[in-house]
Image (cartoon, rainbow, N blue to C red):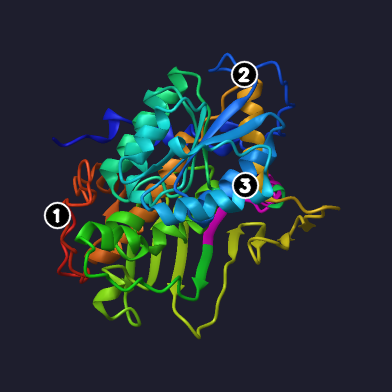
Amino acid sequence: MNKKLDSLTSRRDFLKSSALVGGALAAPAILSPNLFAGTNSDTLKVGLVGCGGRGSGAADQALTADSNVVLTAMADAFEDRLQTSLKNLQTKHAEKVKVTPDKCFVGLDAYQKLIDSGVDVVLLATPPGFRPAQLKAAIAAGKHVFTEKPMATDAPGVRSVLASAEEAKKKNLSLVAGFCYRYSHGVRAIMQRIHDGSIGEVRALYNTYNTGSVWPPFPRQENWTDMQNQVKNWYYYTWLSGDHIAEQAVHSLDKMSWAMKDEPPVKCVAHGGRQVRTGPEFGNIFDHFSVVYEYASGARGFHFSRQQEHCHSDNSDYILGSDGVAHIVRAFTGPYLIKGKNNWRFHEDKATDMYQNEHDEFFASIRNGKPMNDGKWMAQSTLIALMGRMAAYSGQEITWEQALNSEERLVPENPAWNTPVAVAPVAIPGQTKFV
């Protein structure tokens, strides 16, 4: 069935979902220990789904964010990852980790067992391909959710996330995205000035996420099924990671969207390919992308991302306006500055951890009974990355409406270890078809 743009959201709806409207620039709420929407207990029980490095980090930050929170359940596709994470968290948070053996869930269906285990808050940090189904299940069960980025690897997944976000609103549940730069005080400050007109009309945006390679593939074992091999090496398969423009470089595209007040681009064209990931062990993802996004105002967004060793690395953002240029250089640490008619530089006596900030605000929103909902803009930023990938894979110009309404389904329904999952061929621009 072809789902039209207005069946779930519209371009006008996305315009309304600016981070300013959604409160992403607001100061953290003050904790009120006696108020908690969604449970009768003052102790918040947290469950972690996905026990890798980012998931373990999210659990650490969640346990740090609130004085009366405990980790009671963990889920992962693989037992060894879960146990390593559990041991590390127990070492750091001995009094707050209350995970008993019967609350350690392993397998592709482990997330549902965790959701059903009595937790109040769910942290989603599995490979992105699984995110839409897991988010839908958590919201359906009435759980507050922190979800890592990106939120999906295909358009049907994005549409599912949008529906889950609306359901979270109806249920007064907090839904917070792992787009950590939205919670950086320095990036918030410069975005506020851009939105206030300090650089005039935004005419162009340039961003890079050029890095080295990620972890090397695990050699396939004889007893592994195709699904086990691909989940173990999830980064290298588009259906699981979304490719690196979505899994990693989406941070840069999220900042671009934020600078544009979350107005979706009208269309884009892109280049991409793989020069160093030449063997089958590297799955079917690219190792470089370049995308040009066009906005209704005529502004252009220029994106470059690369994962190749022994090359120049850069992670920067430049927003060019009629009255000046905003610089976000070395995105984690700054400097954040404006050069032009209104020179400005961000100063902070003590740097804060944007990863911790997002959990502090997440738990504060739960305590205060004032739910946060990052749903629309987090889905939009995800789709902007997928739109760029679609254009690069196909070699075609892709519009926003085409991207949102794409019927290409990459993720198997109800995946299990014995589910057949063929490796899609590496995309060839001009030959690979947009669906």
Q: Is residue 109 above or below residue 301?
A: above
Which type of secondary structure does the marked residue at label 3 adopt? helix
Taking the magenta stretch, the answer to whether it contains residue 230 is no
Q: Which residues are magenta?
A: 187-205
- Counting from the top left corner in percent of width and height, residue 397 is at 27, 59
Q: Residue at x 41, y 74 (%)?
A: 216
The amino acid sitting under disc 3 is Gln
User: Residue 311, percent across and down?
Assistant: 50, 83
* Residue 226 figure quarter: bottom left
- Of all residues shown, which one is farthest toward the top? 40
Whether label 2 touches label 3, CB < 8 Å: no
Above or below, 425 relative to 8: below
Taking the spot 50% from the left edge, 49% from the top edge, the residue there is: 257
Q: Is residue 414 left or right of residue 342?
A: left
Question: Which residue corresponds to mark 3?
Answer: 90
* Other residues around mark 1 within 10 Å, as few (<14) / some (14–19) / many (≥20): few
Q: Quadrant of residue 294?
A: bottom left
- Label 1 sits on residue: 420
41 or 284, nearer to the observer? 41
Q: Is residue 69 left or right of residue 403?
A: right
The disc labelled 1 sits on which kind of residue? Answer: Pro
